Amino acid sequence: MADYIVAIDQSTQSTKALLFDGKGRICLRVDRPHRQLIDEKGWVEHDPEEIWQNVLALIPELLQKSGVSPKDIRAVGVSNQRETAVMWERATGRPVYNAVVWQCARGAAICEALEEQAETIRQKTGLQLSPYFSAAKLAWILQNVPGVKEQTDKGEICCGTVDSYLLYRLTGGKAFKTDFSNASRTQLFNLHTLAWDEDILSLFDIPACCMAEVTDSDAVFGETDFEGVLPRPVPIHCMLGDSHAALFAQGCLERGMIKVGYGTGSSIMMNIGENPLLSDKGVVTSLAWKLKGKVSYILEGNVNYSGAIVTWLKDQAGLLKTSAESEELAKRANPNDKTYLVPAFSGLGAPYWRSDVSAAFIGMSRATCKAELVKAGLEAIAYQITDIVDIMRDEAQIPDIELRVDGGPSRNKWLMQFQSDMLRCPVLAPEAEELSCVGVAYAAGMAMGLYDESIFENNRYTRYEPRMDEAVRKTKHAGWKAAVQRIL
């Protein structure tokens, strides 16, 4: 009998299912996109029922295309888009409203009303008070969807993140749990007591009885047969937020190890070990995970638009036919062009935390053309990440780093070289894709004894070293800083 693990990654744009064999190798990937429900205010939603149906459809497709017998599936791991908030009926699993996506800033007024409590919230949760996190999104649903507040007060509603919603559906309502990584990103979880904070729940008017049980990231969360696809239920043996899962996949298990996920937005994470460190410089503190009963903390900075910049250049601005074309255009662009894109399409995340600013191109000349605008878009990805990594180096007092990267834009050689130049450090881009799935598959397999830490030897990297003249680098970065200040 062969051993296989199914990894599910429910991300911002799509849901993926990957099959891993007994040696941790990817056998097959299938995926399905879901609709991006965006209105004229820029509010972003997903249909949780559509996402759930996509999960159910992917598993038989994965098994059929791979030829693997359903009886050979040993376990499931789940990674998910973080901060996205979902509320559903405890009795039926039916969502009471669309999922409010992490990009959506509709909770800004709720946060503004709590401004006097911002420092207390930061000290307890490690997070800047912001509509980016789940708390204000859940509070918005409670305040604006008729009847939900009354149901919630009676304990009839589950409030959670995408991982806990999918677990609830996968287990037929038997398990309502989340893991430490996802809990720490809600702005409702106390990093010091490692529990939901009753005072902060009260500030957002969210009943504690509606929150999930918080469980070790590599625990058995429940069992599923994907509504009869498998001949017997198998354990869901890992749940992690997608960025945390990718951090684990990259083997960033020791203090000072750092990685960037270039997804729709970017999450920049530095492992800081077993003790929390709070920063006053715009980066936040979260839990990396709790594995084998031991917690690890991270410094994290998030930008709303990284890979989504390329999508915008292609789909909205019409400057690209394909995302891959951006690399060639950046190479052809005038290297001395001084155009900057500040991609504040839904405000700026770390380290600025300003939801009230808008995007702009700054510094264009008459000679600025399509290639220069695309180059400015790619550079904006690297500049945002540089700002955050520089803060982390200073806060953790770890100046010498090696940056590990993942996500679609990490395939762009021009961007990765520019990132290495801006950060003045090596950048390691893995050959493997879908690192979030790799992370939960590795963690689930290790928890079961199917894999050990030698599994990380599967990772292969392309290495980039800095080569830009230091005076040129400083001039470019200073221009970016000036452009951001213009927006602010």
Image (cartoon, helix red, strand yellow):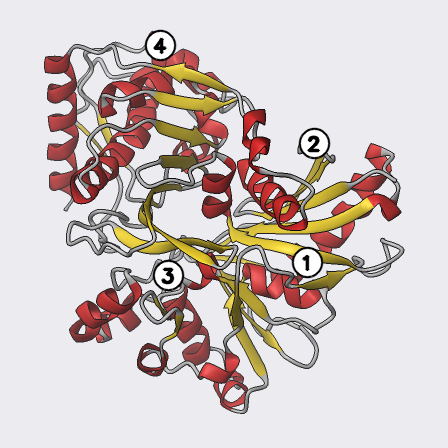
Crowd tier of the residue under label 1, counting other residues whose Cα lies within 10 Å: few below 14, some 14–19, many 20 or above: some
Q: What amino acid type is highlighted by mark number 4?
A: Lys
Q: Give residue 26's position: percent from left, percent from top.
A: 68, 31
Tell me the residue at 38%/35% (across/down): 259
Query: From mark 2 to mark 3, how far is it between C-alphas?
Result: 36 Å
Q: Is residue 217 above or below residue 202?
A: above
Return the residue nearer the eye: 296 or 114.
296
Q: Is residue 395 left or right of residue 82?
A: left
Res. 331 mark: 4
Q: The residue tagged with tag 3: helix, strand or loop?
A: loop
Q: Is residue 133 left or right of residue 146?
A: left
- The reply to whether discs 1 and 3 touch (Cβ–Cβ < 8 Å) is no
Res. 52 mark: 1
Disc 2 vs disc 3: which is toward the camera? 2
Query: From mark 4 to mark 2, how far is it between C-alphas?
Result: 39 Å
Q: Earlier in the sequence, mark 1 or mark 3?
A: 1
Query: From mark 1 to mark 4, how far is it between C-alphas?
Result: 41 Å
Tell me the residue at 28%/50% (across/down): 347
* Image quadrant assignment for residue 29: top right
Disc 2: which residue: 23
Crowd tier of the residue under label 2, counting other residues whose Cα lies within 10 Å: few below 14, some 14–19, many 20 or above: some
Q: The residue tagged with tag 2: helix, strand or loop?
A: loop
